[in-house]
Image (cartoon, coloured by chain):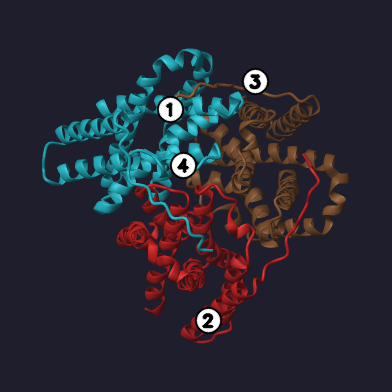
Chain colours: A red, B cyan, C brown
Amino acid sequence: MLLYILYLIAIVAEAVTAALAAGRRSMDWVGVCLLGCITALGGGSARDIVLGHYPLTWVAHPNYLLLTGGAALLTIALARFMHHLHKLFLLLDAIGLVVFTVIGCNVALEMELPFVIVIASGMITGCVGGVLRDVLCNDIPLLFRSELYATVSVLTGIMYVSGLQLGFDHNIVMVVSLLSGLLLRLLALRFNWSMPKFIYSRDVH
Amino acid sequence: MLLYILYLIAIVAEAVTAALAAGRRSMDWVGVCLLGCITALGGGSARDIVLGHYPLTWVAHPNYLLLTGGAALLTIALARFMHHLHKLFLLLDAIGLVVFTVIGCNVALEMELPFVIVIASGMITGCVGGVLRDVLCNDIPLLFRSELYATVSVLTGIMYVSGLQLGFDHNIVMVVSLLSGLLLRLLALRFNWSMPKFIYSRDVH
Amino acid sequence: MLLYILYLIAIVAEAVTAALAAGRRSMDWVGVCLLGCITALGGGSARDIVLGHYPLTWVAHPNYLLLTGGAALLTIALARFMHHLHKLFLLLDAIGLVVFTVIGCNVALEMELPFVIVIASGMITGCVGGVLRDVLCNDIPLLFRSELYATVSVLTGIMYVSGLQLGFDHNIVMVVSLLSGLLLRLLALRFNWSMPKFIYSRDVH
């Protein structure tokens, strides 16, 4: 139930940040709406397609499509106030990351897939939406270059699944994993933690 | 039957316009052929993958692959005459948009999916081919920035599905939706109608 | 069995070349690891999703995920020695292309799909990984512009499937197709063979 409410908050937050990204590229209202839906629901869709887990979430619950599309459109009207909420959206985006991760792990756990795939399922759910947003905006995905985004997702997933396998109470494991992942992400943002980069300048081909 | 003939015309038209886009980026013959197939058949493939509607159209009917690949290759030979046909191809592309939309709605209707998903299925079928073409050509998808393309698809779908739900004759609803959508698209092209843009220049991240 | 060993070599080689591509774009370690996995396993995943052939290879065999991710990470440590191995990696990449192609054909043959789709399945398996790498690195896919890459895959597939249909021994057909495809690819690299380009400079839209 808590997870469900957090999920709704998270997809709205993802749709709003995608709409702002669309606005920075002067997309039209339809583009804003589509980019919002794709970013918010793309991670879960990619996971379901990869795992063959049909129907996709938004096909079973079309309201999610209306919710995210509506949030993206509303962003256009409210954009002038958005920069005051900058920090709120960074927080909501971080909540989205860990919530999506836990939901993705749950889907793979229900399908009784092996540990590595459960973690991958969480990471795909948490991260692919942002990758799609960046590819459609013609950028190199931030995921591949930025602060601990995928790392937070993987660590949250490992903590969550390990906790369950060790037999701890489901709700406690969930809350602890979500909070730890969230804390790690916020610390990474605050202190600009990042993974080391791999810089290779020789031309191989 | 009419829809089937229009479908064949539409995939050929999409393959030809994709081949010209490939030529503007100096792709080789294989790239032209592949981009033609992906653009013409990508919308229906994306719809089928998203809805879990297997086998994909071109897997069940490999001739479509040969038809679109052949049309793309033929474009290379005939390119010097293509600019005389500029307006014909804009018309055929517009026909493709509304025909793909109606076919996409039909697939979702047969699967007894809810209204919103039927419209989304029509839009995915109508628009994703062009998005794939633009991503593979390393452009921001035109769909997100241009004149009423997705809008025409959504309105055509709404008209078609509403007409059916109101109990009108199937053929009449289809022809009226196709013609209205086509008219709207051609008017949008003629008078440069476009959706308002959302321009947002503050850097949030 | 031979095919299996060659497959393992091929996915490692693809992961390493993708890691070097990631290094040329200064991605962080997570990006290197992800790009390695996506490039090495993306072709087979795309084929399985398009054909509705579940579960995907790496979902059934999570070790492939660890192997390719590990190879990508190891590349970071060993990058300084990699340029000495430039030619070895071109060879391994060529082996990967033909091995992936034959495996892709086998999957479609087992599903009893028609000839054209079997060839397409081989080509998707052989080529899509590199396309994903290029799209995620924000390049126009090399596939659409370079030396006989897709062509080698298609010809290898045609030789393999035709040989089987003519009733020759499976192992002989496989080895002959692999070696012929490999030879063609290496000759194309050595002598800079390429498909003719289609250059079209008129602006249609």
Q: Relative to residue A101, is residue A6 drawn left or right?
A: left
Q: Nearer the viewer, residue B182 or B188?
A: B188
Q: Quadrant of the C terminus of chain B?
A: bottom right
Q: Nearer the viewer, residue A68 or A47?
A: A68
Dot 3 corresponds to which residue? C196
* Label 4 crowd bin: few (<14), some (14–19), many (20+), radius 10 Å: many
Q: Chain of mark 4?
A: B
* Label 2 crowd bin: few (<14), some (14–19), many (20+), radius 10 Å: some
| Residue pictured at 47% horizontal, 49% vertical | A25
Q: Amino acid at mark 3?
A: Pro
Q: Secondary structure at mark 2?
A: helix
The reply to whether dot 2 and dot 4 touch (C-beta < 8 Å) is no
Q: Amino acid at mark 1?
A: His
Q: Relative to residue C201, is residue B97 drawn left or right?
A: left
The reply to whether dot 1 and dot 4 touch (C-beta < 8 Å) is no
Dot 2 corresponds to which residue? A179
Q: Are marks 1 and 2 on the same chain?
A: no
Q: Secondary structure at mark 3?
A: loop
Dot 4 corresponds to which residue? B141
- Single out the mark in the foreground, 1 or 2: 1
- Single out the mark in the foreground, 4 or 3: 4
Q: Secondary structure at mark 4?
A: loop
Dot 1 corresponds to which residue? C205
- Single out the mark in the foreground, 3 or 1: 1
Q: CA distance from mark 1 to mark 2?
A: 52 Å
